Image (tube, rainbow, N blue to C red):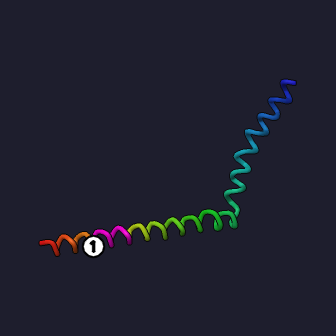
């Protein structure tokens, strides 16, 4: 019984990294999940920067008009 458990553990230890390596090297997976996600994050970041600039500009304009 002990040998079977050790063989199972060894197969698990070896199959997990090999499976992860195989999945990460799939071109379709990489493009669909990594590239598209990074593009969306970049678009969101650009939008946040744009909004921040607009707020700063409006704040600066309001301060100038008060003086």
Prevailing secondary structure class for the magenta stretch in the rendered image: helix
- Residue at the (59%, 68%) spot, across then down: 36
Residue 7 at x, y percent in the picture: 82, 33
- Residue at the (45%, 66%) spot, across then down: 45
Residue 25 at x, y percent in the picture: 68, 60
For the C terminus, give its image quadrant. Answer: bottom left
- Residue at the (38%, 72%) spot, across then down: 50
For the N terminus, give its image quadrant. Answer: top right
Label 1 CA crowd tier, 10 Å (few <14, some 14–19, many 20+): few
Q: Is residue 55 left or right of residue 35?
A: left
- Is 52 inside the magenta-drawn segment? yes
Q: Is residue 23 left or right of residue 35?
A: right
Residue 10: image quadrant is top right
Q: Secondary structure at mark 1?
A: helix
The furthest residue to the front: 66
Q: Which segment did they paint magenta?
A: 50-56
Residue 51 at x, y percent in the picture: 38, 70
Tell me the residue that label 1 is attached to: 57
- Residue at the (69%, 51%) spot, across then down: 20
Q: Is residue 59 left or right of residue 50?
A: left
């Amino acid at each position: 019984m002990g040998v079977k458990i050790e063989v199972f553990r060894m197969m698990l230890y070896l199959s997990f990294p090999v499976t992860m390596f195989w999945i990460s090297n799939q071109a379709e997976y990489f493009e669909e999940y990594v590239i598209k996600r990074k593009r969306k994050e970049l678009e969101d970041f650009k939008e946040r920067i744009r909004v921040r600039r607009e707020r700063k500009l409006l704040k600066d304009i309001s301060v100038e008009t008060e003086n």
